[in-house]
Image (tube, rainbow, N blue to C red):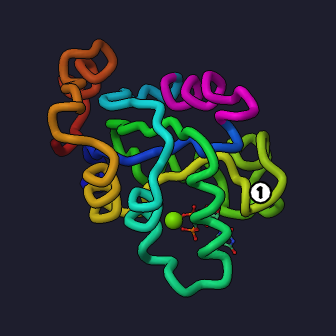
Amino acid sequence: MADERFERTFVAIKPDAVNRGLVGDIISRFEKRGFKIIGMKLLHPTLEHAQKHYAEHVGKPFYNNLINFITEGPIVAMVLEGVNVIDISRKMMGTTDPQQAAPGTIRFDYAQIKECNVVHGSDSVESAEREIAIYFKPEELFDAKENDEDYFIRKYGHVEE
Ligand code: UDP
Ligand code: MG
């Protein structure tokens, strides 16, 4: 119980998934879980976006390929809000390598290789705050508090704000 709290995370639907027409299916999974979309845009990431986003991977063997891939075409950038959304949304995505991902996860269901694994999700509160700031201005985010499902969770749940 003590670990339940409302969080925000940064999710990106990567260029491969946008190109393949998977945007609606992927967004729909998060909405059905009850997560609220509090920010969303289609954008073509610049080199600066990509380098900031993946700064932790500089120097790794896959880094250049990753930067080329993420700047290849538009992504759908989203900020989701919900109870433990950081951990749960990554569970919904599955492991980095779709070959290892559990059946039913997004990466298992829609992807074949780790280089083109259709989605990104922040891995911690700190990463989420950092990544949200790369792609969104504060005024581009909207408050989900008035939405119906949050209303009931907030009213009857024991969830930290
Ligand atoms: N990646 C890759 N080769 C690797 C590891 C990662 O191409 O050996 C890509 C992959 O698309 C992954 C991204 O780099 O989603 C970021 O890697 P990370 O380890 O942060 O995985 P994630 O958090 O996305 O699961
Ligand atoms: Mg990561």
Q: Residue at x 54, y 87 (%)?
A: 59
Q: Position of residue 147 (x, y in %)?
A: 27, 15
Task: Specify whether residue 30 is painted magenta.
Answer: yes
Q: Position of residue 78 (x, y in %)?
A: 41, 37
* Quadrant in which the C terminus appears: top left
Task: Specify whether residue 154 is painted magenta.
Answer: no
Q: Quadrant of residue 160?
A: top left
Residue 63 drawn above or below residue 105: below
Residue 66 drawn above or below residue 131: below
Residue 130 drawn above or below residue 154: below
Q: Which residue is mark 1?
A: 98
Q: Residue at x 28, y 26 (%)?
A: 153
| Total numbered labels | 1
Task: State left or right for residue 59 relative to residue 148.
Answer: right
Main secondary structure found in the magenta portion: helix
Q: Position of residue 75 (x, y in %)?
A: 54, 40
Q: Residue at x 56, y 39 (%)?
A: 74
Q: Position of residue 143 (x, y in %)?
A: 19, 26
In the rendered structure, which amino acid carries the disc numbered 1?
A: Pro
From which residue to which does the magenta span run?
A: 18-31
Residue at the bottom extreme of this rendering: 59
Q: Residue at x 49, y 52 (%)?
A: 121
Residue at the top extreme of this rendering: 148
Task: State left or right for residue 44 relative to residue 6.
Answer: right
Query: In terms of secondary structure, where does tag 1 sit?
Result: loop
